[in-house]
Amino acid sequence: MNDAPDFSQTDDEPRLLPLRGSGEQTGLRRLIEDLVAEAAAERRTRSLPSVPVEIDIAEGHATAFDADSLRAVLLPLLRAACQSAALARGAASDRRRFSEVVVTSVDTGTAIEIEVADSATESADEFPAMALALTKARAFAERCGGQVALAACPEGGLAVTLRIPQRRARGMAA
């Protein structure tokens, strides 16, 4: 049974996404490291080629969002980016032979931005896996008042940025 939240359902009733308990944080670097390891293990199990993944996230970077909620959104994005990069690595051109996935995150003060970029995909429409991952990411972002942005990388490829607002302390003076 999969206990991961389903963010594809929509209705008119606004919902709050799961947050960790008061003062608890989800470490983003550790979460991404776990997701990369899981995606790599899945690829090995299916006899698919490995893909280099660079994680550029500071050790102490964290958010109040629940790890399972983030996992349900980020793992499909990571899988799709790895699939795209792996397919490109098999292509003949030199540029594509060096395809990789890069995951970064930044705290803007009001939001956390997590970017998953591959150096191969030219558009989200190229791969059904990416289109499905984007659907989940957009539903997640909508529910928490965030955004998903797509950008073409200068060196080629596609960057998907998930921007989720940070919730501030609830006990502010009136």
Image (cartoon, rainbow, N blue to C red):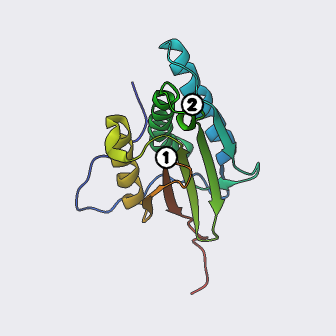
What is the CA distance from the residue labelled 1 to the residue labelled 2?
13 Å
The answer to whether residue 159 is above or below residue 51 is below
* Front residue of this view, candidates 38 and 47: 47
State the image coordinates of residue 58 (x, y, percent, origin top left): 74, 51
The residue depicted at 48 percent of the width and 33 percent of the height is 79
* Front residue of this view, candidates 24 and 141: 141
Q: On the rendered image, what quadrant is the N terminus found in? A: top left
Q: On the rendered image, what quadrant is the C terminus found in? A: bottom right
State the image coordinates of residue 70 (x, y, percent, origin top left): 51, 46
* Front residue of this view, candidates 82 and 97: 97
The residue depicted at 60 percent of the width and 34 percent of the height is 98
Q: Amino acid at mark 2?
A: Arg
Which residue in the structure is indicated by mark 1? 157
Mark 2 residue crowding within 10 angstroms, few (<14) / some (14–19) / many (20+): some
Task: Please give the label number shown on residue 97.
Answer: 2
Secondary structure, mark 2, is helix
The answer to whether residue 20 is above or below residue 77 is below
The answer to whether residue 90 is above or below residue 169 is above
Task: Please give the label number shown on residue 49.
Answer: none
Q: Tell which circle, 1 or 2, labels the residue nearer the N-terminal end.
A: 2
State the image coordinates of residue 72 (x, y, percent, origin top left): 45, 40
The residue depicted at 63 percent of the width and 54 percent of the height is 105
The answer to whether residue 51 is above or below residue 158 is above
The residue at the far front in this view is 93
